[in-house]
Amino acid sequence: MSSRKPLGWGLIGASTIARQYMVPAINAQPDSYVAAVMSSNGEHALAFATAAVIESAYSTVDDLLADPGVDAVYISSTNDRHRDQAVAAARAGKHVLCEKPLALDIADAVAMVEACRTAGVVLGTNHHLRNAATHRTLKRLIAEGAIGTPLAARVFHAVYLPAHLQGWRLTQPDGGGVILDITVHDADTLRFVLGSEPLEVTASAAQQGLASGALEDTVMGVMSFENGVQAQFHDAFTIPHARTGFEVHGTGGSLIAEGVMTQEPVGTVSLIRGERRELVDVGHRENLYERSVREFIKAVNGTGEPAATGEDGVRSLAIALAVRESVQTRRHVALRYPY
Ligand code: NDP
């Protein structure tokens, strides 16, 4: 047991993800706990605090940041609010674990990274899939040469948006849509697993009955990576019966991961070489969000890095925005990364 003072977390956003996954993940650590929650709706903050047994509830970010028990914040408000809340937290000297997409444009995401650098606080992006034993196994096997030279990847991330989440994702012009919600995760996971960066993207999107206004609820596309890999992706809110998956095909074999684009520590990884298909042992299946919080705490303590850094969040956002630009312009879009 460490003698270090436990890390007190303030939740900015009394959200579904905070309630379902992050409060349990924070409280599961021996050295951290949720100290406070903030919602712009004071009654909602109070109800959330009561249900999750959190000591303090606030209705403004400033009040939460003034709480001396808050050392770090977890931001899971709607996407349009991440930037201002993260910058305010950094200026108040709090470490920041922020949900994806970090922001709505690159300048705002860069401002978040810079604010945290200037304040000397940690910034992490909550790209949970990097923490999955399955994706970590894919990354390791590819790096070990198990499939030779990777040539192609396929990401199947088309799901049906559950009824209780059919709100701002389908209606909010700034921050809604499947690209900022799901493609941004594909971008991060592909970068992580392949250890390479997309150079160019091309994509096509549509409305299939859920999203409104100019928002897309389905998108398909291709990312071309620096290492020569072509990756196809299909993301949707509208597909009730498909399975998710992540495949990488190389000169010497193929890796097939099934049921892995999910919040749970589930799914399988198979290695195919010729006629032989072998199920790979992915080792301990830790809760994805517990691992995210644990790595973040290590970074706060100066003994590691967040599983996905702020710079990773900037890159995944840059890729998602390039996908959206490709949809809008019907052209290939070259990636430009600020970092
Ligand atoms: P929710 O719609 O559940 O919550 C978003 C905001 O809506 C809350 O912060 C709150 O605003 C407001 N809100 C929600 N419920 C109520 C209520 N009953 N009464 C009043 N206000 C309410 O969002 P999600 O949890 O689905 O997503 C939040 C963020 O997390 C997004 O950035 C999303 O992209 C990300 N996300 C990440 C996932 C991951 O696995 N990494 C998975 C799911 C989401 P207020 O801030 O004012 O309290």
Image: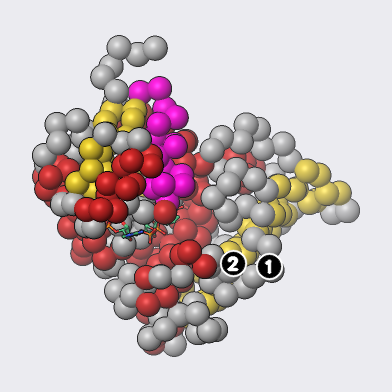
Which element is circle 2 on?
loop
Residue at the extreme right? 275
Q: Which amino acid does the dot numbered 2 rest on?
A: Val
- The reply to whether the C-beta atoms of the residues labelled 2 and 1 are less than 8 Å apart is yes
Asked whether mark 1 lies closer than 8 Å to ligand 1, one says: no
Judge by depth and name the residue closer to the eye, 51 or 142: 51
Residue annotated with mark 1: 242
Q: Is residue 96 left or right of residue 226?
A: left
Residue 184 visible in the picture = yes
Residue annotated with mark 2: 159
Q: Quadrant of ligand 1?
A: bottom left
Residue visible at 21% across and 64% down in the picture: 107
Q: Which residues are magenta?
A: 17-31
Residue visible at 22% across and 53% down in the picture: 42
Q: Quadrant of residue 322?
A: bottom left
Q: Which amino acid does the dot numbered 1 rest on?
A: Ala
Main SS, magenta residues:
helix
Image x and y of residue 175, in percent: 33, 70
In magenta stretch: residue 18: yes
Q: Is residue 260 left or right of residue 2?
A: right
Residue visible at 31% across and 63% down in the picture: 79
In magenta stretch: residue 225: no
